[in-house]
Every structure is written in C-alpha cells, then in structure tokens.
Image (tube, rainbow, N blue to C red):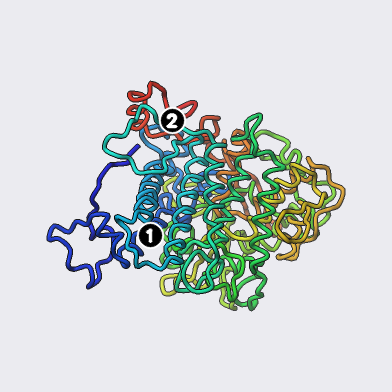
Amino acid sequence: MKLNKILFLPLLALLAVSCADLDMPADGRATYKDIFGHYERTVVYANSCMGYILQPGLGYDGSPLASLCDEAQDASDYADGGISNWYNGMTTPLYNPAGDCWAHYYAGIRRCNNFLLYINDPEYCSPDFREEERQGWIAMVRVARAYYYLQLAKRYGAVPLLTIPYSTGHDYTADRRAPFEEVADFVISECRRALATPEPDGIFGFRWNINDSDRGKLTRGFAYAVMSETALFAASPLFFESGSKYTWEEAAAITKEALDQCLNHGYELYTSKPASTVAFGPYDYYCFTQSDPSRSIDKETIYESTSRMSVWMHCGLPTTPGQNKAGACPSQELVDCYETTDGQPVLDLERPYLDDDHLKPNYNRDNTLYRADDPYANRDPRFYGSIYYNGAKRYLDGRDGTVETFEGGNCGISSDVNERRYTRTGYYMRKFNNSRSGIDIEGDGFIAVYRLAELYLNFAEAAYQSAGPDVLVQSTVQGQALSARGAVDAVRARVGMPALPKGLTAAQFGLRYRNERRVELAFEEKRFFDVRRWKILGQTDAFVTGMKIEPAATGGYTYNRVKLMERGTASEKYLLFPVNQDDVTKMKDYTGVSWQNPGW
C-alpha cells in the first residue's frame, strides 16, 4: 500500500531549516526523538500533516475536474494527455488519468499516524510544550487524517483503516478493506474527538476563529464540514447498504448539526455587493476574491485552496493575451440548468430532452421568459458570473470586448480537433475569472474546498430525502429549525433568485434540488462525485453537447445544438476508481483476497 516503514526522515525534506536546526548530525537525518523533542520541528511536522489536502483547481492537465464529468468538454479532448485518455476510456489499474490518489492520501495518513503516536509518548515528546497548543496540534491532525480517509472512500469505496504506523514486523495477512460505513464511523468519531478538545481563548489550539496569518490551518468549521460531507455520502445510493446506521434521517441530523454550529459561530453566505465595473454581483465576486481566514469580510469560506486558478490562461478566451487553451468548455447541459429570473427551469426537469442525443430540448411549458432565438437573456445571475457566452461582455469596466462564439467570431467554436485555444461547446468558463486578469494581473480566484453554501445544500438533500421538502428539522444544537426548501431558498436568495414553490412533492423537489446544487457549485469539483454517489453516471457522462451559432442572413443568429464525442467513462465500473494494480497484487499474495474494485 505504498506505506514504507522508514524510521528515520531526512530533516531537510521535512522542514525549512532554521538556525536552531544546525546542530543536527552531518548526514542530515533526524530521529523522531530529535523532532518531537524540539518545538520548531514539531510545529513544522504538525503543519506537514495537513499538507496532503489536494488543491482543487487546474490540476488535470491544467484543467479543472469539471472536464472529467458532464460540466464541460475540454478543448484538449483530442490532444495526447490525461484528458483525452480519460474520455477514451483508457483508465486501468496501472494508469488513472485522474491521478493515483491512493498513494497520495496514504502518505498523508502515514504522517498523521506518526505524529499522533509520538506526540503522546513522553519518551519522545518534550514536556515543555504548552498543553493547549499540543492538544490543538493533535485535534487538527486527527481531522486531517479523517479528511484523507473520506477522500479515499469517496474514490475507492472500502479502504484499509490504518491508525498506527506499520512496524517492521507488521502482519499484512490481517489487513482488510473497511466498508464505507466503517470508514464513515471513523471519520465522524475522529472529528468529534477533535471537537471535544476545549476551545482555547488565545491564539493556540483548535479554534473556530483564526488569523489571516494562519491560512491553511484547520478549524472547527472544517471538522463539521467533513462530518457533513461524510454523512451525505454514507446515506447516498452508491454507499448505503441495507441496515446501515447512515439513513437519510441520520444524515439530516448530522448535516443540520454542522450547519447550525457554523451559523452559530459567525459563518454567513457572502453578500458583499461589488461595483458594477468589477463583478455582476456577490456570487461571482466571491468566486474570484481570495478569502480572509479571519472572516472579517468573507464569512462563507470554511477552507480554501491555496492555488490560484489562472482561468484566464488555462481555461481562457483566445482574445486574452497569454491564453494557452480554452480548457474546460461548459456543456450545453450545464447551460440548460440555469433558470430564468422568474425561477422557472428552462427545460422540463423530469425529461429535459426528447431524444437520446440531447439535441431536442423539452422546454418547460410554464416558462414564459425563455426565448430560443435569444437564449441567454433573463437567466439566473449565476449564469452571467460563470459562463462566457455569445454576446457576453468580456470586461465590466467600460473597455471594449464582446465575446463572439458564433462561427467566424473572435472566440468562435472550433471544428479543428488540433486547435485547443477555441471552445468546443460554444461557451467558455467565467467562474473564478476576474475580467481584469491577464499577463500583467493575476486576479483570478481560488476554489473553496468547503463553504457554507455547500453545508446548506448537504442538509437540504438529507432533509428532503428523510422528511420531505417542507418539514422543519431541528438539531440538538441551538439553532433555528429549517426545512429542505428553506435551506435551498437561502442559497437562492443570495443571488436574488425567487424561492422554490411550496407544495412540491419529494420527487419534484429532488429534481429542483439537484439542479440547484449543479448551478451553485458548478466547477467546484462536486459534480464529479455527485453523479457517482447518486449512481446516475450512465445518464450524465456518456457525452455532452454544445451550441453551434451562425449569423442569420436576416440578422440575429441561428442556434443549433451539436453532440460531441462519445466518452468511455459512463460504465458502472467508473463509479469508483481502480485500486493500483501493484497494491492489488501484493495484497492478494498476503490475504488471498482481491482488493480490486468491480469491473477493473
């Protein structure tokens, strides 16, 4: 399992050496006693345990994870590399274009296990550490390890639960893959153990509130977000098994507790209104503005990636100097999800398309604002902040620049499979993109790993599944009773969208909820996992469509939907990643059991 058994670590690889570290042996190695008997080295080791949180963003051949699901068609679809290999179904147990997360997260778990072992051993750990600070380190490392296990289980399902470092005499024949429910038990219990640590008054320990200089540290809000996500996945069709404790009722209780705790400690949806020359509204402004961990302005972000997106370069417009590719081109299916401003879906959500190729939209008869000859007018404000479309303003500060995605336009759709700088779908990604970004200004945003809007939506899903859309749910935590519809409406209200209708059945609400989640969390690396945990991959990921636009002889444009390449990633085996074959072979030799996931 790629968990080596080294008892000594190269000091220079472990930490940035300070003057206090220069009295180490000449070979540069430090024992664990050298590390945990020394304050600065212990701080660095604790921080390194939190360094395995994969940074969401432009990590897949310079494209977001949206390119690997039905949110987008990547402009690198025919170029050699991970994107085309994914689309062509070339994933194997020896090669995963989406990354070998198994080795990565277990490396983080190994480091966390070492820390938790030695920080509690008086033979290794200095007695001079502040107890409040030591307990804070332990809590944060516990939560980091819990998060790593959640990420593994989301991707691989059952995984081995390792809580102590492997010794040289470890009995591999006793190793087993723990089912998702067991992993969920561990993750939630570890978060609760961390949260049971008394909250300190000062700057040390496991806190709700941190300073801007503490960026990257885990907070109590992060622990609750991990619990919320874990409960949601455990109750979802992919992982729920008959008799499991993680019913939708249990998930509703846990997600409500997490939401209440964050609301009680000052988290709020971001509502700061920008100048019209900067952004369309609070939603897109939030998405390209870096958070402030002190939450003096941004009270929504719970934990944010430290990697700036640089959308302008990697998923940008060909009219932007320095752009190297169009990257993730939003799909027509995603565009269809944005309602009109009266709160009506554009398509009939129960049957959005009349044909299997998604070329014949089934329009919602109750929608009176949508016009097929002017399809981008009167849409949900999040559409304008997330998508560059034909006729979109490139700049908001008065500079010239209209996006032309019609054939022959300055950003026209590309039919040349070797051209990566122009859109495949007729759209470009705008979310996270500050229109002023370019060669001279890096002003694009950062993906939130967790934010409050997601916690609202997590609760809404569990609540409607367990009690229906309009039943008020209260938790053991002091907080306002809330219904599933109320939670969704809170997210919609932030952008000025009308509340959902009252009286929806659970099935009707479920369609509206999934549509809302898709719109609010677009390009945030949630949809890739949502279609898997809902087990609808075969309905969503076989292909996507785009919009081919041509100038009409009489003025205006004609709009024609086009189907893009078939993908080889919609089969059931893609619900879970394959386990690396090297590990499968080793563990089959030890245990006599194949650790490989179904279909691989």
Label 2, secondary structure: give it.
Answer: loop
**Residue drawn 60% across and 47% down?**
546
- Residue occupied by mark 2: 176
Measured from the top left, where is residue 268 in percent x and y? Answer: 66, 67
Q: Is residue 375 above or below residue 276?
A: above
Q: Position of residue 381 (x, y in %)?
A: 69, 63
Point out which mark residue 46 bears: 1
**Residue farthest to the top, as pictured:** 592
User: Which three-letter amino acid code belongs to the residue tagged 1?
Assistant: Ala
Label 2: how many residues lie within 10 Å, few (<14), some (14-19) or many (20+)? some
Percent across and percent down for residue 131 are 43, 65
Label whose residue precedes the other's in the sequence (1 or 2): 1
Q: Nearer the viewer, residue 519 or 46?
A: 46
**Few, some or many C-alpha atoms within 10 Å of disc 1 (few <14, some 14-19, many ≥20)?**
many
Q: Nearer the viewer, residue 300 or 516?
A: 300
**Residue 564 position within the rendered picture, expressed as x and y whole percent measured from the top left:** 55, 41
Between residues 87 and 467, which one lies in front from this camera angle?
467
Please tell me which residue lies in front, 88 or 20: 20
- Left or right: 33, with 355 as reference point: left
Q: Quadrant of residue 48?
A: bottom left
What is the quadrant of the N terminus in the image? top left
**Left or right of residue 77: residue 465:** right
Disc 1 element: helix
